[in-house]
């Protein structure tokens, strides 16, 4: 809970810093607060907070995913100086909202109770609805906010209705007690119906097809840096909560819901990769890429073992690094060209070679090419899922092969054009280049020596 308190105080300070100098210091306050929170996350939890364990249980798994989320949010904040140039009048609010959303993610990492789960999802999501529509001069941003809010409210209704049915059956909100109930009453009709409704709500949060309808429009319409945050930190929080809910609270009813997730995986992988091939806009392609990775991640439910949470954490960290690696270039191209089509990236390697290499390495990692972190991550989850879901792994391999085609289109645009289409003298900032180098090194290092992940996060 110490980390949660630090993040909340940092968010409040960043919010009120807007009173002075139009939020000039909000970014630095946020970075400092995140660094302090990251340091505290490595320390043992204060015994004073043990009295709140029935509602907030910050265990080792919570600490691991909290560390990952803070590191990724730090990278997003480093990109914020250039990305928020058009939001100088209210950038303090955007940084604060991001920190409030991260606080919701920390709550999701520590929920032992369905009430805490609901609170975490809402604290995570509500700031996102505002941030999605923060570009007031762009109608697509307003459309993204409305769609995200309406679909999110609809999913929340499913979650609450499902929670009510589960509570009505088990007589408790505590997930450990619900787990014991599910083992003894795995086929209780009302209980199973509640599970299905909650599964649908969580599938929306992680954008599994066909609950992904909001993703392409919201990702494309939102400011790019907000999209980067959605595709990384929100994905981390959503999948951890999804996995913990289904494999702990509803473990006794696994036969009732595991096949449904299998069907969702097939639909997700085939639909998202087919739609990704049809895109001409890089940002929209990345939206379908995010949906496809939700399909790969959902394989974690099959053949679950003691290493499942570690595999999930490694995959989410590798994917988040790759997402930031692509979006740092996309943010710069969008500012210069006012568009994000594949054509806009032509010849980027001649103008900004470091950023182009970072984007190429990130895309290859997303595709699961050997010697990248993405390959190790996919191999770990696919190997686990082979125990009982070999057909789904086959579908996932086919999906990965298809994804290479649309990832290569962006790489070809950047590297294989004789002349650069960038006629500007403006260069990427030192901060962006440092982040790009960090991502290149991190992705390749984790791909060659995966145990570095354990060393980084104190495992």
Image (cartoon, helix red, strand yellow):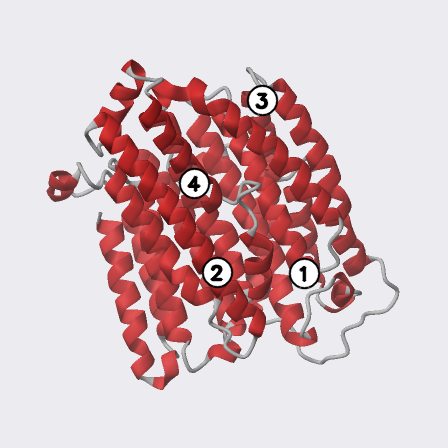
Secondary element at tag 4: helix
- The image position of residue 65, as x and y in percent, is 39, 41
Of tags 4 and 1, the one toward the viewer is 4
The residue drawn where x is 54% and y is 79% is: 137
Of tags 2 and 4, the one toward the viewer is 4
Mark-to-mark CA distance, 2 and 3 = 31 Å
Looking at marks 4 and 1 on the same chain, the residue that comes earlier in the sequence is marked by 4
Secondary element at tag 3: helix
Looking at marks 1 and 2 on the same chain, the residue that comes earlier in the sequence is marked by 2
Secondary element at tag 2: helix
Mark-to-mark CA distance, 4 and 1 = 37 Å
Looking at marks 2 and 3 on the same chain, the residue that comes earlier in the sequence is marked by 2
Disc number at residue 76? Answer: 2
Of tags 1 and 2, the one toward the viewer is 2
| Residue corresponding to mark 3 | 383
Nearest the eye: 413 or 393: 393
Disc number at residue 202? Answer: 4
Note whether 248 is above or below 211 in the view shown: above
Mark-to-mark CA distance, 3 and 4 = 24 Å
Note whether 348 is above or below 383 in the view shown: below
- The image position of residue 79, as x and y in percent, is 51, 65
Seen as rendered, the residue at the extreme bottom is 21
Pointer 3 with pointer 4, Cβ within 8 A: no
Mark-to-mark CA distance, 1 and 3 = 34 Å
Q: Residues within 10 Å of mark 3 (few under 14, many from 20)?
A: some
The residue drawn where x is 31% and y is 84% is: 20
Disc number at residue 354? Answer: 1
Mark-to-mark CA distance, 1 and 2 = 18 Å
Seen as rendered, the residue at the extreme right is 418
Q: Residues within 10 Å of mark 2 (few under 14, many from 20)?
A: many
| Image quadrant in which you'd find residue 281 | bottom right
- The image position of residue 177, as x and y in percent, is 22, 25
């Amino acid at each position: 809970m110490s980390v949660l308190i630090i993040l909340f105080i940092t968010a409040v300070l960043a919010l009120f810093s807007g009173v002075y100098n139009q939020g000039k210091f909000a970014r630095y306050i946020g970075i400092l607060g995140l660094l302090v929170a990251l340091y505290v996350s490595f320390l043992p939890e204060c015994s004073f907070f043990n009295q709140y364990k029935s509602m907030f249980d910050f265990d080792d798994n919570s600490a691991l995913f909290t560390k990952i989320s803070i590191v990724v949010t730090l990278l997003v904040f480093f990109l914020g100086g250039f990305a928020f140039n058009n939001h100088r009048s209210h950038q303090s609010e955007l940084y604060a909202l991001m920190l409030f959303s991260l606080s919701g993610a920390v709550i999701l990492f520590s929920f032992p109770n369905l009430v805490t789960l609901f609170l975490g999802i809402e604290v995570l999501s509500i700031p996102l609805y505002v941030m999605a529509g923060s570009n007031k001069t762009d109608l697509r941003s307003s459309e993204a906010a409305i769609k995200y809010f309406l679909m999110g409210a609809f999913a929340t209704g499913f979650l609450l209705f499902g929670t009510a049915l589960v509570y009505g059956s088990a007589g408790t909100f505590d997930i450990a007690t619900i787990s014991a109930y599910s083992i003894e009453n795995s086929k209780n009709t009302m209980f199973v119906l509640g599970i299905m409704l909650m599964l649908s709500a969580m599938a929306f949060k992680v954008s599994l097809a066909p609950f992904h309808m909001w993703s392409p429009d919201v990702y494309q319409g939102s400011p790019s840096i907000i999209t980067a945050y959605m595709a990384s930190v929100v994905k981390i929080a959503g999948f951890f909560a999804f996995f913990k809910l289904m494999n702990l609270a509803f473990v006794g009813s696994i036969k009732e819901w595991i096949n449904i997730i299998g069907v969702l995986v097939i639909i997700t992988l085939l639909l998202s990769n087919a739609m990704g091939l049809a895109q001409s806009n890089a940002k929209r392609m990345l939206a379908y890429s995010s949906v496809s990775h939700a399909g790969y991640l959902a394989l974690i439910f099959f053949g679950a073992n003691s290493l499942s949470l570690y595999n999930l954490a490694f995959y989410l960290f590798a994917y988040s690094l790759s997402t930031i690696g692509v979006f740092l270039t996309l943010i710069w191209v969008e500012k210069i060209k006012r568009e994000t089509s594949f054509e806009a990236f032509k010849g980027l390697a001649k103008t900004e070679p470091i950023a182009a290499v970072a984007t190429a390495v990130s895309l290859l990692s997303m595709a699961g090419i050997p010697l990248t972190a993405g390959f190790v991550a996919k191999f770990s989850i696919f190997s686990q899922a082979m125990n009982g879901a070999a057909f789904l792994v086959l579908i996932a391999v086919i999906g990965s092969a298809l994804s290479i085609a649309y990832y290569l289109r962006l790489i070809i645009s950047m590297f294989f054009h004789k002349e650069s289409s960038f006629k500007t003298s403006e260069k990427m900032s030192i901060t962006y280049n440092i982040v790009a180098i960090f991502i290149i090194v991190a992705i390749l290092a984790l791909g060659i020596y995966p145990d570095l992940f354990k060393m980084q996060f104190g495992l």
